[in-house]
Amino acid sequence: MTMETHSAGVPTFAAPAADQPVRQRQAGGREGGGTLNVFSQAFLVLWAALVVLPLAWAVLSAFKDDKQILSSPFSLPTTLHWDNFSRAWTKGHIGDYFLHTVVVIGFGVFFTMLLGSMAAYVLARYQFRGNRAVYYFFVAGLTFPVFLALTPLFLTMHNLGNAGIPMLNTYHGLILVYVAYSLPFTVFFMHSFFKTLPTSVAEAALVDGASHTTLFFKVMLPMARPGLISVGIFNVIGQWNQYLLPRVLMNPQSGFDADRSVLTQGLINLSINGGYKSDWSGLFAGMTIAMLPILVVYVIFQRQVQSGLTAGTLK
């Protein structure tokens, strides 16, 4: 640092020339970072609008009558027609479809989480011959599109029915397919999470006399709760919104009772049950009823989902 003296005799300090490029680079970095932040925030705002606006439009349309939906689809409802929801729930049989879906999703998610966490724990904490092969076998399931397996899956379940094991058009058959469909992601996610858990805790439990089963259910599984909540939410959303599998495996046209359809099938039935005159207001009300549980579940558990997704990288 150099000191300069002005005519008034007051000394002033000037930064060395070597510091000036550093300051310029810092200022340029702040300007570049500010531009990137503005672009990122603008993209997030656009993305939020693309997600929120269709949902808000569907919810607002659920409170309109058919005339206002067709004449002014983007306007606010002049009168709140709450009867749309009751009509969709009773006459549209959304209530029955909703109950069927809750039963299927309840058992499907339970067995998915149980089997997926057990498989992931064994693959993550125990070394044996073929460990990596089994793990990559599960991971390979993530790359296989479900629509490519529809025909062989249908034929397999049909042949099981011919062998005396009814699987088509049954809830237990659909539940088993949901479990198989959701296992690859569950094993992949929980395998990484179990890897982050401390080994010393497991060793201390084994020294105290805990069996491997007790170690898993009483020690390791409670420690993996954030990951279980996160992957559980994803499984609920994925199975709740599933349409292809129930459409193929529970087809009313194959002699199956249509009243036992799940919610995604029920919305299609609601849109076409009027023949040439569709019940648009009832359809939007049914869509709102179908969306509401998933939105409520995610809003309640959003912090747990975020903590579970980041726990593996923070530990």
Image (cartoon, rainbow, N blue to C red):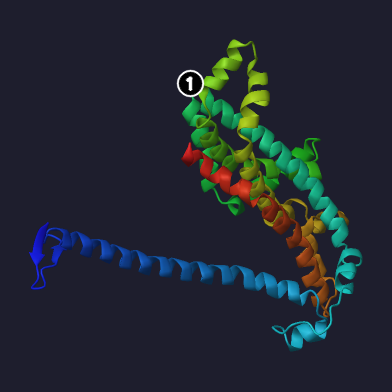
Which residue is drawn at the image coordinates 70% and 58% (left, top)? 295
Kindly indicate the quadrant of the structure image that contains residue 218.
top right
Element at label 1: loop
Q: Position of residue 169 (x, y in %)?
A: 80, 48
User: Residue furthest toward the bottom?
Assistant: 71
Q: Position of residue 16 (x, y in %)?
A: 12, 59
Is 158 or 6 nearer to us in this picture? Answer: 6
Residue 38 placement, left or right of 296: left
For label 1, the crowd category at 10 Å Cα-Cα, with few meaning under 14, some 14 to 19 and many 20 or more, is few
Which residue is drawn at the image coordinates 77% and 41% (left, top)? 107
When the figure is inspected, residue 280 is found, relative to residue 201, above or below; the finding is: below
Is 149 or 110 nearer to us in this picture? Answer: 110
Residue 96 placement, left or right of 210: right
Per the image, the residue denoted by label 1 is 129
Which residue is drawn at the image coordinates 72% and 73% (left, top)? 58
Residue type at tag 1: Arg
Is 283 or 231 nearer to us in this picture? Answer: 231
Q: Is residue 168 visible in the rendered structure shown here?
A: no
Residue 141 placement, left or right of 297: left
Which residue is drawn at the image coordinates 52% and 26% (left, top)? 198
When the figure is inspected, residue 158 is found, relative to residue 73, above or below; the finding is: above
Residue 23 placement, left or right of 311: left
User: Residue furthest toward the right?
Assistant: 90
Q: Is residue 88 visible in the rendered structure shown here?
A: yes
Q: Position of residue 170 (x, y in %)?
A: 81, 45
